[in-house]
Amino acid sequence: MKTLLFEIGTEEIPAGYIRPALDFLARTVAARLKENRIDAGDITTYGTPRRLTVMVKNVALSQKAETTEVTGPPESVGYDADGTPKMPAIKFAEKVGIEVAQIEIKETKKGRYLCASVAEEVKASAEVLSDILPELIHKLPFPKAMRWADLSVTFARPVQNIVALLGEAVIPFAFGKVESGKASFGHRFMNPGPVVIEDPDTYLETLEKVSVIADFAARRVMVKSQVTEAAKEAGGFLLPDEELFDTVTNLIEYPVVVAGTFDEAFLAVPDEVLITSMREHQKYFAVVDEAGKLKNAFLVVNNTRVKDLSLVRRGHEKVLRARLADAKFFFDQDLKESPDTWVERLKGVLFQAKLGTVHDKAGRIKGLAEALAEAAGVSSDAVKNTTRAAELCKADLVSHMVVEFTKLQGVMGRVYAERAGEEASVAAAIQEHYKPLYSGAELPQTSEGALLALADKLDTLCGCFAAGLIPTGGADPYALRRQAIGIAQIMVQRGYSFPLRPILEKGVIAYAERIDVNVDETVSAITDFIRGRIDHLLFEEGYAKDVVASVTTVGINVVPDIWMRVKALSELKENADFEAVAAAFKRVVNIIKKAELSDGLSVDAALFEHESEKELVSAFTATRIEVEAALKNGGYSKALSAVAGLRPFVDRFFEDVMVMAEDQKVRANRLAILSGIAGLFNDIADFSKLSA
């Protein structure tokens, strides 16, 4: 067993390319080793802007021996009656590489067939890897790849060196004009030039001696520790930014932190603007005081240790001064106008060719927001503030600041609304209506923000489905999956128990003048789509797939109830006799589904032929009262427990009677009994979907 080391040395790769490339390397190396019958141990990746590396421990030195049994033609086809091989047997032997005498005859379900045991060729792992590794370089996916010199190969950036070792031995191959070997490179400025990797197990230590911290996790810890300490020395605290830590770590090979300051006059600009300007353009960390207020200080992580840090600091301060001056200019220009004036300009901003302008969208959002607010039963002030926020929620999209920093959409809307004297809840809702930004992210904290966020997301869903812009496979250009997840999360968090379908109908109808749309079909398609996202959320929370399917299949119209129903059914499934309960009610449901019952069926006691029929109807009558009382208060667990109590009566019924009796009246009567029982839980779960 030896360690495999594979390093692709390059010019500086963009930070966002590195992690996906390393994940691909780890995943693909594991798969290719397995496909080629090469046993291997743990796989680790390392990466910097100038290298992508994968290391595999305990790699076998040769492929694992394997014998495959190959089946040929029937014996009657391969041999004469006296056992003399015919041409099909001879050709079969040639095909699998054996002598005719080595063919075996095996008895199968179809009869006697020619068989042969074929030993797969066993190659040295180094020989196999010399084919696998260059293939990986060619297949590494990047958002953009480039060519260089007169070469036909492509990569994210020009490849400078390749280290490919199995133990201390080089795995020979070439990519373009670069041949594999033992030579890596040190830090571009502090230790330029090649460095020989004699042993894969000393890779990290060897590079560290030439000022390269190849381990991303270790480098990130160094960055975080240094900037945190530098923030304290600057008289404040580091503003946490995990995403920026990841980005900066992938921009450097050796961290050197420098602290700088900017003119306090810039602090008149909102913190969000200054932080975004520093973060997006310069990758600088912000420093705050104990109250979380921004200080006129910043931290930058350089890639080189220099003698005169003050010179470096002055350079960064000069660059940042220009950036912040631009930001202040944009902010001051925006304050000369009110958000209401920007609303009119939205008529010139296209939302989507089939769906109209952003101004059109804002109008639809306002209508939906008002309907949602009334359905949620909020106060009249909340209704007024929600609709006002809807009028202004997209206005900041035409502001100078958001045009420059698109990530500040909503944030600047809140700031400008506050400056214009709008109600606090109106301003907050404008920022919150974009939330959650992803599954699991922060949800709107105000009632107005939650309602406005729902209106915005529902309008996008309704419009895209009406226009046929439905996600397919991995393509989801309008982030409809995220919108649907956000709708579900907000409704559950806020406990909105109003029906979803009427709101969807209103949303789709709003597009009727623009798009020829079948409202019922479109609403049903949107409902199915949201159901899929709800299923996904419930799976992530650890609920069983059969439980989720049994609940969401019967309906998702009242979203918070879905979680209560899933929880109740999951609890019932934990009971020792659940399998018997599930089996009994699955049988009830399946019979009802197959029977194709007509409407208006009723139970006639005069048609009972067995005592078990009478007992079941009596128990059902009492249980129905209990279930209806429980469901009025959302007591799904209590309702399901009551239904489960019917199981002995159902079992006895099935033992004593034949449901599909020859007498049509008796048959209809028994089906009516089962239909009533199914009706007890058909708004809670479909027992036929349960796996046990």
Image (cartoon, grey):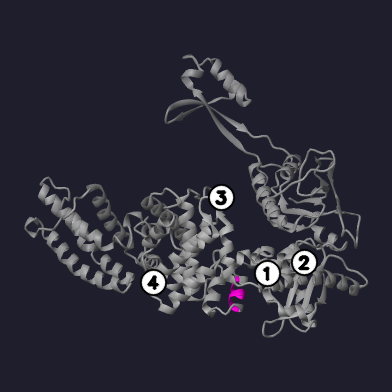
Question: CA separation, marks 4 and 3?
Answer: 36 Å
Would you place residue 189 above or below residue 264 in this image? above
Callouts 4 and 3 close, C-beta under 8 Å = no
Nearer to us: label 1 or label 2: 2
Q: Which residue is mark 4?
A: 374
Q: Which residue is mark 2?
A: 282
Q: Which residue is mark 3?
A: 474
Question: CA separation, marks 2 and 3?
Answer: 32 Å
Q: Is residue 87 visible?
A: yes
Tell me which corner region of the image, top left, top right, bottom left or bottom right, holds residue 369.
bottom left
Residue 143 horizontal/vertical position (percent): 69, 50
Tell me which corner region of the image, top left, top right, bottom left or bottom right, holds residue 439.
bottom right
Residue 475 horizontal/vertical position (percent): 56, 49
Which secondary structure lies at badge 1? helix
Nearer to us: label 4 or label 2: 4
Q: Does the magenta segment cover residue 416?
A: yes
Callouts 4 and 2 close, C-beta under 8 Å = no
Which secondary structure lies at badge 4? helix
User: Between disc 1 and disc 4, whose residue precedes?
Assistant: 1
The C terminus: image quadrant:
bottom left
